[in-house]
């Protein structure tokens, strides 16, 4: 995929070493999806908690994955997990499937993929159907022993941001539903954060979806934004202080990581794979240090009823629509690949645990 495919990271922020940045990570967590919070901990940041959202699977399933992977590294006693909203603002599996009949099948349907009981019984996370069901066979990291800390993630995020005004970075690696709900719950929420980093918001990738395999089309689709276009609109127009790809894993890199054996390197080695980019991980890496990336700035809006549903449309300032209040965002166009891989290895091979955070 072209480099200009990862939307928005908070950039240009200098963090004094004496005071750890606080962060909340909202993601559709999975068996090998724990690297973003390990990177934050490796940087010395304080992870206030994880939020599970609906994107690749339902929020309950992804929240439990978050809890399970924390337990793998003895982190569940000091990092809570809160479940997010079951549904996007408007979209349902039925609505998206009807949209596909009009505009074509999505190469990656995420939670909107028709329910497949057989697949769920053999290791797939649940899609469509009842959002409260759990597919235990998908927990290759082990099913969690503990319980979630809460079931109203947006309210919890509002509480944390008000408790630590100007100190909390918000990370979104899945859909923006919970963040948009927090914005609607508290009009000051966005302005009280330290910033927002988003994995999603691809630009100019349509030809890449037509000129190769369905896997290439998948890599260049944008399920995080397609899941909840209303939430995208709310989040991208909120007054966050800052709104801010591709590096693919190789077998050689996975082998190198696995030279140090621990539960996290074993999960990455066995289940991460080499066919999809480091999407969520690069988003997290990008916000750790402004020098990690090169960025470009412009204004964005969200497309609605069209084949571009949920995706973003970019403007230069001179051509902005007069009847909308659009925000300027930072788009990552280049990542320090050598530094990323070095920090990735360190975070996995020497992961922090709760005893290290005291």
Image (tube, rainbow, N blue to C red):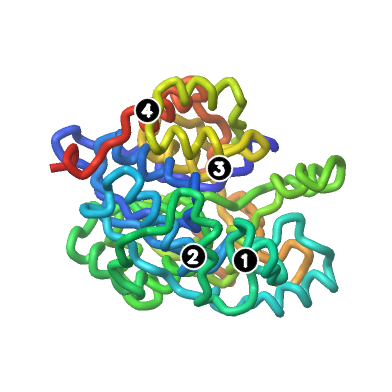
Q: Position of residue 18 (x, y in %)?
A: 14, 35
Query: Image check: 12 left or right of 336?
Result: left
- Given this view, does label 1 or label 4 mark the residue nearer the observer? 4
The answer to which quarter of the image holds residue 41 is: top left
Closer to the camera in the image, 21 or 48: 48
Relative to 101, residue 257 above or below: above
Residue tagged 3: 279
Residue tagged 4: 349
- Given this view, does label 3 or label 1 mark the residue nearer the observer? 1
Say the numbered circle drawn on residue 61. 2
- Given this view, does label 1 or label 2 mark the residue nearer the observer? 2
Closer to the camera in the image, 253 or 142: 142
Q: Secondary structure at mark 3?
A: helix
Tell me how far mark 3 sits from mark 4, CA to CA. Answer: 20 Å
Picture residue at 76% right of the left edge, 55% below the top: 107
- Give the mark nearest the N terminus, 2 or 3: 2
- Give the mark nearest the N terminus, 4 or 2: 2
**Mark 3 packing: few (<14 Cα in 10 Å), some, or many (20+)?**
some
Residue tagged 1: 111
Query: Do the residues bearing badges 1 and 2 touch, measured as CB atoms within 8 Å?
Result: no
Relative to 259, residue 227 above or below: below
The answer to which quarter of the image holds residue 2 is: top right
- Given this view, does label 2 or label 3 mark the residue nearer the observer? 2
Picture residue at 43% right of the left edge, 68% below the top: 178
Tell me how far mark 3 sits from mark 1, CA to CA. Answer: 18 Å
Query: Do the residues bearing badges 2 and 3 touch, measured as CB atoms within 8 Å?
Result: no
**Mark 2 packing: few (<14 Cα in 10 Å), some, or many (20+)?**
many
């Amino acid at each position: 995929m072209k480099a200009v495919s990862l939307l928005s990271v908070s950039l240009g922020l200098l963090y004094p070493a004496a005071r750890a940045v606080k962060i909340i990570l909202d993601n559709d967590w999975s068996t090998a999806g724990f690297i973003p919070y390990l990177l934050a901990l490796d940087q010395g940041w304080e992870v206030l908690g994880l939020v599970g959202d609906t994107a690749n699977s339902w929020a309950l399933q992804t929240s439990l994955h978050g809890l399970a992977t924390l337990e793998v590294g003895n982190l569940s006693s000091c990092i809570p997990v809160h479940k997010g909203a079951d549904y996007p603002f408007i979209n349902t599996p039925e609505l998206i499937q009807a949209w596909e009949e009009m505009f074509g099948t999505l190469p990656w349907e995420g939670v909107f993929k028709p329910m497949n009981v057989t697949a769920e019984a053999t290791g797939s996370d649940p899609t469509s159907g009842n959002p409260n069901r759990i597919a235990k066979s998908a927990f290759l990291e082990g099913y969690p022993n503990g319980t979630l800390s809460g079931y109203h993630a947006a309210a919890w995020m509002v509480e944390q941001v008000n408790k630590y005004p100007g100190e909390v970075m918000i990370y979104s690696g899945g859909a923006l539903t919970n963040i948009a709900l927090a914005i609607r719950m508290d009009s000051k929420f966005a302005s009280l954060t330290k910033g927002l980093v988003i994995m999603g918001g691809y630009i100019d990738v349509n030809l890449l979806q037509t000129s190769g395999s369905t896997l290439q089309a998948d890599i260049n689709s944008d399920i995080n934004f397609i899941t909840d276009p209303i939430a995208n609109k709310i989040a991208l127009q909120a007054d966050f202080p800052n709104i801010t790809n591709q590096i693919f894993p190789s077998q050689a890199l996975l082998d190198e990581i696995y030279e140090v054996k621990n539960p996290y390197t074993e999960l990455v080695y066995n289940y991460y794979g080499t066919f999809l980019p480091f999407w969520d991980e690069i988003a997290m890496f990008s916000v750790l240090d402004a020098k990690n990336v090169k960025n470009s700035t412009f204004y964005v809006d969200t497309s609605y009823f069209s084949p571009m549903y949920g995706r973003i449309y970019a403007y230069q300032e001179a051509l902005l629509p007069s009847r909308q209040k659009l925000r300027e965002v930072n788009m990552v166009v280049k990542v320090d690949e050598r530094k990323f891989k070095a920090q990735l290895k360190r975070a996995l091979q020497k992961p922090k645990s709760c005893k290290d955070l005291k």
